[in-house]
Amino acid sequence: MSLTYLDGNAIGGLLWEVFGVEMTVATGVCGGCGASRPVAELHVYVRAAGTVVRCPSCDTVLMTVVEAPDRRWVGLAGLARLEVPREER
């Protein structure tokens, strides 16, 4: 049985709350295989209190988010880089 995933747009609001900028257009570079994709194209698995974001190319866990009533833990250990475009002024 394979788990159903959402695309990275599913966590756009959550990432906005954490980073304060639009992150679905940011580019995530996988620390496992080196694939480079917009966050909007990453695979998102949402279960209970946790969210896991995986590389579509090699299935490496790129990000984890765990939420509790008083705090949120964000792990980015699987990312080699997270490239955030600057806003045009």
Image (cartoon, helix red, strand yellow):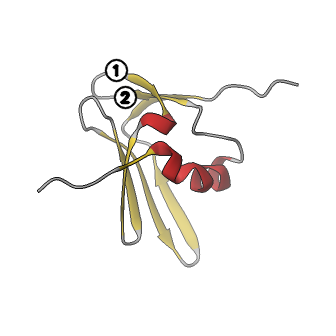
Q: Is residue 20 above or below residue 78?
A: below
Contact flag, marks 1 and 2 (Cβ < 8 Å): yes
Label of residue 62 in the image: none
* Residue farthest along the bottom direction in this orientation: 69
The number of numbered badges drawn on the structure is 2
What secondary structure is found at the residue carrying circle 2?
Answer: strand
> Which residue is the site of mark 1?
34
Q: Is residue 20 left or right of residue 25?
A: right
Q: Which of the 4 quarters of the picture holds residue 89?
A: top right
Q: Is residue 75 above or below residue 33?
A: below
Q: Which residue is label 2 attached to?
A: 30
The residue at the point 11 percent across, 57 percent down is: 1
Q: Amino acid at mark 2?
A: Cys
Identify which amino acid the numbered label 1 is placed on. Gly
Tell me what residue is drawn at x 58 percent, y 31 percent: 26
Is residue 85 left or right of 74 when viewed as pictured?
right
Residue 5 image point, x, y percent: 32, 51
x then y, percent, for residue 10:
50, 52
Label 1 environment density (alpha carbons within 10 Å; few <14, some 14–19, many ≥20): some
Q: Nearer the viewer, residue 75 or 35?
A: 35
Q: Residue at x 67, y 41 (%)?
A: 22
Give me the residue at 40% from left, 58% from top.
Answer: 51
Q: How far separated are the C-alphas under marks 1 and 2?
A: 5 Å
Q: Position of residue 8 (x, y in %)?
A: 47, 44
